[in-house]
Amino acid sequence: MSQEPSPQQIAEKKIYRQMGLIPDEYNRIVELLGRQPNYTETGIFAVMWSEHCSYKNSKPLLKLFPTEGPQVLQGPGEGAGIVDIGDGWAVVFKVESHNHPTAVEPYQGAATGVGGILRDIFSMGARPIALMNSLRFGKLDKAHNRYLLSHAVSGIAAYGNCIGVPTVGGEVFIEACYDENPLVNVFCLGIVKHDQIQHGKASGLGNPLLYLGNATGRDGIHGATFASEELSEGSVSKRPAVQVGDPFAGKRLLEACLEIYHTGAVVSVQDMGAAGLTCSSIEMGFKGQTGIDLDLDKVPKRAEAMTAYEIMLSESQERMLFVIEKGRESEVQKICEKWEVPNAIIGEVTNNQHLSLFQDGQLVADLPLDACCGLTPVYQREARPPEKEMLPKNLSLEKEPENYLSVLKELLVHPNISDKSWVYQQYDSMVGTRTAQGPGGDAAVIILEECQKALAISMDGNSRYVFLDPYLGGLITVAEAARNVVCAGGRPLALTDGMNYGSPEKPEIFWQIKESVRGMAVACEFLSLPVTGGNVSLYNESGGEAIYPTPIIGMVGLIENLHHVTPSNFQSLGDQIWLLGETFAELEGSCYQEIRASRIFGNAPKLELDREKRLQEAVLLAIKSGLVSSAHDISLGGLAVALVKASTESFTASISFESALRTDEFLFSESQSRILLSIPSQSSASLQSIMADQRISAMMIGEVVSNQFSISFKDESLIEDQIQSLKACWRNGLRDYFTKT
């Protein structure tokens, strides 16, 4: 075993920089301690002061989000947010990212992202019942990007399928900016009774700390700091910073924890996620204003001669830390034995507000908890908008296309529009028997048999719009996620966010963060949607180039009556098809612009929050009134694509319209606040009345037919084809990248 550097050597040789600390931060640590930290202490500060754990660059901006509401039982600050759904039940949910680990080891990086978010949920006392994910990868004509995506999907499937929690939806986006720096954001939702909610706040002098789960190894050391730095050519050497998952151990741990909660012996519980034993112990002690003593000799280990530094910074998976009522240890340990979960008493709660580590009978680290957790640096970065790129007028958009069917087919095979079943068919979306609507629609629907209600959940984000206009893109991100939930029949309750950006130290990037957060916050306030927590992932760059600013929303909505669950596909021949909302000449930033001009530029589509709110309220009222057969949000590719996606092999659309807009603008604009409805003909008058009351534009544009998809303008046929042909085109757009030899 190599000798660790002394405190003097750490200072003189600036070894702290290798751990992710800058000189000013190190000097502040020395000031707070009144001495130079040793190697273990320096490592602890490095992870606790990393962006991943402390939010030192984003904390001032995150304060803009509304976090309270009558439905909020737990906002930011715990493992996950909690929202009341009535009848003594609550839902627990959160988004986490595992971006950098996936970039260097896609299978385990994505798999452990799933494992981590599951533990966040059951650490709050809830049983996880649904998973979703947002995946963003580089262009698929590159073999390496196909490798990253295929192995990440395999990792997600392997963990979720084995642990028995259904993956019910999500999104996949392909953009060149994610080359070498993919994004994997994972959402999990659980259900819990109010009296079983758990918290991570240590208390009770002398109460024992119980370690549950797998033994501690050397995997994942400094994973938190790795997540807080830019990717480079040398990042592959950091594979040891990527954790290794064990879903079968995770399942045993989950069931053991849920049973332990029912004993009433649990004082506090925390997942050993980012920064492992360090973060879990420090945060529990800090929130409880207690102290924590740990005997590292008692920590279960799977490697010989592990140092205090390695033990504390390991991010080995499937581990939890409990504070148990003194005297009830054996009661809890019996449950662990039943589920074959390794466990050990490794310390106790003190009252000195310090983290004290002992090894071989010696005090090897002693740190004030507030220095580690409460006094982390907070940076006010410079924000500066980038210079506007001067582009010549693109001639290809000055005239309409000659062949609309050809354009529609080109859009349908676009990887961001095409069918994602190649991805989600690898996931088990039905395990647990709660899934009423799984992947492929606007939102997933989960049945809550406990209270005869349902949840509509969506995961959304359009990084192109945020790139073109961060403020508008932020508004759209929130509004679209809520709109998707409404289309499934749900009343939006609250959201969690995953904030993915480049380096905040670059003024142009920080401006993107600042403006998009501002837009999201304004939308949340207007739509009365509290943010209950989330995740920030910065330094998503490779080769000095940043990703598009990519905020992701996990939205949760409540369906109080199971009869209000609404599918996104046409249901009956002869139903009328209605276009709700106004269409504008907004082709900039659209998929149509990309295929015609070979790039995106210009402005994001505008969004008026008042109109958006009225639209959502009107559609919910129409659904609750029993008027609606199906509802589908109009987003990427515009109306024409939405009509194909809403079609099935049996039911499709025959459309005829008139418009003052150019035909390509009417069909392919990505104007916001629009929904496609199908309704029985007898519902027409009632629907028009509701829309008129809410001042929402409503146009009957066609009817549901069988077999032949058609769109006409003033009785002139523009597009006509067998729906089976169009659906085949749509199904193969993404799949072909992975199935062609």
Image (spheres, rainbow, N blue to C red):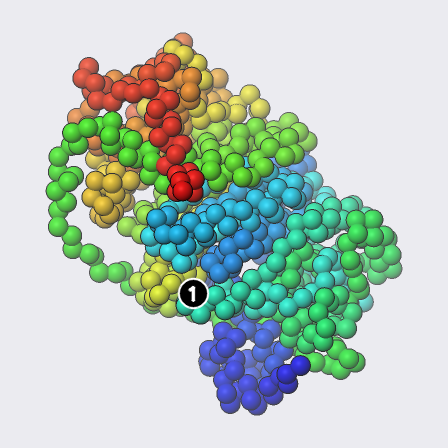
Q: Residues within 10 Å of mark 1 (few under 14, many from 20)?
A: many
The residue pinned by badge 1 equals 231
Residue 346, horizontal then vertical, whole percent: 77, 67
Image quadrant containing the C terminus: top left
**Residue drawn where x is 20% and y is 24% of the image:** 659
Depicted 226 relative to depicted 255: above or below: below
The local secondary structure at tag 1 comes to loop
Q: Extreme top residue here?
A: 682
197 horizontally vs 347: left or right = left
Residue closer to the observer: 147 or 375: 147
Q: Quadrant of residue 717?
A: top left
Residue 15, horizontal then vertical, whole percent: 52, 82
Residue closer to the observer: 632 or 425: 425
**Residue drawn where x is 30% and y is 25% of the image:** 697
User: The disc labelled 1 sits on which kind of residue?
Assistant: Leu
Image quadrant containing the N terminus: bottom right
Residue 562, horizontal then vertical, whole percent: 58, 24
Depicted 106 relative to depicted 563: above or below: below
Residue 607, horizontal then vertical, whole percent: 31, 40
Residue closer to the observer: 594 or 566: 594
Residue closer to the observer: 717 or 633: 717
705 horizontally vs 449: left or right = left
**Residue drawn where x is 32% and y is 48% of the image:** 464
Q: Quadrant of residue 130?
A: top right
Depicted 719 relative to depicted 16: above or below: above
**Residue drawn where x is 73% and y is 48% of the image:** 252
